[in-house]
Amino acid sequence: MTTPTAETTTARFGQLEHRGILLGLGAAQLAVLTIATVVAVAGVYSAGMGGLVAGAAVWLPLAIAGTASVRGRPVVEWVPLVAHWHTRRLLAQTTQVTRAVAPACDLLIPGVPGSLRVTETPNLAAALIHDRRAGTLTAIASVRGGGFVLDDAAAQEHKVAAWGRVLASLCQQPTVVRVQLVLRTVPDGAADARRWWRQSAQSDASWAASLLADLIDEAYYTARRQDAFVAIALRAPRGHRRRLAAPGSARLEQELVALTDALRGAELTVDHWVSRDRLGATLRPAYDPVGGARAGDPGEVAASRLLGPMGVQEHWSYLRTDSAVHATYWVTQWPRSEVHPSFLQPLLLASTGFRTVTLIAEPLATAKALREIRRAKVEHAADAAQRARVGRIEDESTRAQVADLARREQELIAGHGDLRFTGLITVTAVTLEELDGACAATESAAAQSMCEIRRLVGQQGLAHLAATLPLARGVL
């Protein structure tokens, strides 16, 4: 007699949608092609074939720009990106420095216009970062799990189902704007060992003491710590300015308690909600990882100044901060086939380098999600009719996109929620040479995870802000 074994649910992802107005071409591409056609036709009508050849210097580059793609992006979309980058360079906006702020209620972050107001809930003592421009209040939870890869199939199935319930509950809460999961590896500096050595070691010149001191010094550079945070952005109560009223504070705390209970059901332990006193120690490693390790205890960051002063220098393909350089990647395509829920293991469990993996989930209202799906289905139907008219064959990727839309619509009608996911990966190193090696290792790990990633260029400042800070600020 055999014992039945539990089968772990596999994960399935849809393809990255490339929507267009006509034959997969966007509005900008169609506008450029229209101009190229007008120039070519005008040349033919004015001077025949000679006019067409003479005008080729104009209409041919426009035609290429309207149809060609570079690194998965149409050429016409590169033009505003490059222009914006050079404009920012000319205006010296790629280098930003923040100063220390005297009040403990203001948070200055390079790349974020203005300051973010920081308040605190009365009971949980959770720091609430108020983004007045976005109208959101963000709280950060430090979490830890009991492992997944070494669990048996039944335990893995339970955790996957529980995490699915956590995501489903987000879609049922209208106050939830965005949820961000941040998994980062940072230098630890062997703070506990160095602290014990300073307090307990005797000052002697023995070879054993010298050897132990050398080992502790080496651990300063090699020790690593893995942190996990869940940040939730909630809609700010109407009329909230400098402080929360009692009803608004109670409602926000109920949301945080509900998230704590949901995470506990998924066997994730919330160690604590990050308080205002520890907010600087939580955010600082994103800009100064080596300095945070040198400080010994992360809690030593002064609460009176939260995060500053610090500076960033943005380059085309990387970002330089106080003590490190960073490069951020965007996950352009999740695995196309069904995969085990632990498919991200090569990216998350890297033995070398410092890496931050971020998953951003934005709940979509059911009505809005259905409108987007039906609009996309209409666009696909129009493209199919146009392809049939010109004699083009529908490719398999288009069929897969239509099938994904039908599946999503069925799930929404059945009562499930819809979430928009974005994956970002930030690689951190001390020097550019080390960064190149770490980026190569990250690209290899992404390939092992069956994910396609793209290094963002001209947007490293915004990308670093969205990927490394657990502030649930959303995508680019």
Image (cartoon, rainbow, N blue to C red):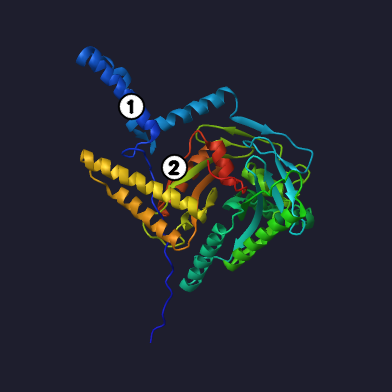
**Amino acid type at image mark 1:** Thr
| Residue at which label 2 appears | 454
**Residue 472 picture location, percent across and down:** 60, 48
The residue at which mark 1 appears reads as 34
Labels 1 & 2 near each other (Cβ < 8 A): no
Give coordinates of residue 246: x percent, y percent.
77, 55
Residue drawn at x 20%, y 40% is 391
Q: Is residue 34 left or right of residue 361?
A: left
Q: 310 or 440: nearer the eye? A: 310
Q: Is residue 35 shown above or below 51? A: below
Q: Nearer the viewer, mark 1 or mark 2?
A: 1
- Is the residue 206 above or below the residue 468 in the image? below
State whether residue 208 appears in this view. Answer: no
Point out residue 125 in the picture as x, y percentages from the top left corner. 75, 56
Locate residue 25: give its quadrant. top left
Count of numbered tags: 2
- The Cα atoms of the two marked residues, 1 and 2, are separated by 30 Å
